[in-house]
Amino acid sequence: MPKQSTIMSGLECLAAENIWFDKNRYDEAERRFYEGVNGPCTQSHQQSSSHAGGDQELISRMRSLELENQSLHQVVEEMRAALQKLESRVAVLERSPSTGAVPCAKAAPVQQVKVENGGDDDDDLDLFGSDEEEDAEAARIRQERLDAYAAKKAKKPALIAKSSILLDVKPWDDETDMAKLEECVRSVQADGLLWGASKLVPVGYGIKKLQINCVVEDDKVGTDMLEEEIIKFEDYVQSVDVAAFNKI
């Protein structure tokens, strides 16, 4: 009986205490205390590892986006440099004279040839001598030679000024039929226009431009006429630029 009464008194004592009902709260407080002293537990390490793995993936994606952004910047810079170069060439062409006239060669000084008395060679005659020394026969010979020179000069074909032009024809997008675009460009025909070689040059983002050469007679065909005719094919052509212009 005394032992049983002792047990009952112990149970009554425990029943009066609330510590066992708040055990979870005390355990949690104890765990937090030791984590503050010794660092997080293994589970926290695992969670940190998983977070670190997610951060690493995010960093990798950010780096790939940065590299892609750098490549896009490079393409933009290249296109900007090409545009500046083209603007410089157009400015030079606008400042240069539009006529294709060839400057006349400086006339050679007239050399007088002294006529020797009794000479039989016609080359010894002074065609531009004084009136006192010129007789009727010398005047006739001079006139014949002048007429022969004029006739020879009239038969000589006139010099035709020509130019070689390199055009950049740009499409709307990468889905444009470049073969059809080139066919449209070559369909432009005019007197004094001859189309030459062509090639496709990458621009960026899968888009290619048509670079085509032509030879024109300056008095018959100009760059403005070519641009106006090619830009009419608006279903295929976005723009036309003069990449190079050289006199032949």
Image: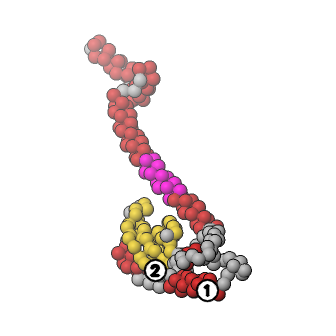
What segment carries the magenta color?
65-81
Q: Residues within 10 Å of mark 2 (few under 14, many from 20)?
A: some
Point 45% across, 23% down: residue: 36
Where residue 33 appears, as percent x and y from the top left, is 44, 22
Where residue 3 appears, as percent x and y from the top left, is 28, 13
Left of 46 or right of it: where is 211?
right
> What amino acid is at disc 2?
Leu
Where residue 62 appears, as percent x and y from the top left, is 43, 46
- Circle 2 — which element? strand
| Image quadrant where residue 130 sits | bottom right
Q: Is residue 30 above or below residue 151?
A: above
Question: Label 1: which residue?
Answer: 137
Determine the main secondary structure of the stretch shown in magenta. helix
Point 57% across, 76% down: residue: 119
> What amino acid is at disc 1?
Glu
| Image quadrant where residue 102 sits | bottom right
